[in-house]
Amino acid sequence: MIFVFIMKETIHFYKYHGTGNDFIMIDDWEKHFDAENHKLISLMCDRRFGIGGDGLILLQNHESYDFEMKYFNANGYEGSMCGNGGRCIVAFAHFLGKIGKKTSFLAVDGPHEAKVGKSAIELKMLEVSAIEKADGFFFMDTGSPHYVRFVENLANFDVFDEGRKIRYSDRFKEKGTNVNFVEPEPDGIKVATYERGVEDETLSCGTGIVASTIAHYIHSSASGDYDLPVEAKGGNLKVKFKKTSNGFEDIWLIGPAVQVFEGEYRVQS
């Protein structure tokens, strides 16, 4: 009897998380990964049948920047900017020796700067100017669209159901929006997020943290520059920014980005 063993294609990957927002990271410097294979990406992100992750990120070469970030939601399709993913890919690029302590890279929303510290990655976000303030909520784009609502007793708040109602409301159901629920604290804020593309609550969301701090700044009638800690369900971050007559600039998202393991994913036929 003759046994024939067929070796399936394998993909080398790393797993990172930024305050519980977790990502599959792939060194795709030569751009060989099939980024149009949405089914494959979705399956890799599946927490039961794949590796598991809130998204998948490709690290690619770019002629004008240190590297390019390609981010895909867990549904398999390319998404808008991901702040925690941006911090994680900076840590990944530094781990691979492709950047030093400072970097400039390209993401879907434009160029970003970042700094690598001993315990945190600092990521500069794009300026924010167009902010909708309505009865009971704020809406803005911080690289991704965010609906921000202030609530009480966030620990017992139904983030999934309430977030899903807003994300699939008549206004947002076509393109979607991320939804952030914020509880002010004496020395900062707590934030919980329902994230489109993942279509579930995530433990942290970088662009949502930025949107929540800007909303809190306006909501609390603050003045001057902002430097405040934020507690997400997956850990703590910090946001710094400057208020100008045109909006908010020099925005920095600061927090840990941790490599948790590496492995080989066997592509299923």
Image (cartoon, rainbow, N blue to C red):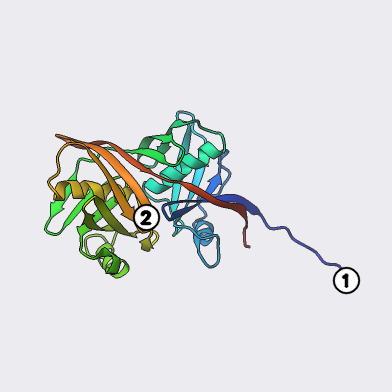
Q: Which residue lies under the disc numbered 2?
A: 204
Label 2 crowding class (10 Å Cα cut-off): few <14, some 14-19, many 20+? Answer: many
Q: Amino acid at mark 1?
A: Met
Among numbered discs 2 and 1, the one appearing first in the sequence: 1
Alpha-carbon span between mark 2 and mark 1: 54 Å
Q: Looking at the picture, how far across and down is residue 117, in whole percent?
A: 44, 36
Image position of 4 (left or right of 40): right
Q: Residues within 10 Å of mark 1 (few under 14, many from 20)?
A: few
Exactly how many numbered labels are in the figure?
A: 2
Q: Is residue 75 above or below residue 83?
A: below
The quadrant of the image that shows the C terminus is: bottom right
On the image, the x and y values in percent for residue 84 come to 40, 48
Task: Name the quadrant containing residue 253.
Answer: top left
Q: Is residue 7 above or below residue 238?
A: below
Q: Is residue 82 in sight in this rendering?
A: no
Residue in the picture at 35% in, 53% down: 205
Question: Mark 1 falls on what kind of element?
Answer: loop
Left or right? Give the position of 56 relative to 217: right
Residue 90: image x %, image y %? 46, 39
Residue receiving disc 1: 1
Residue 220 drawn above or below residue 152: above
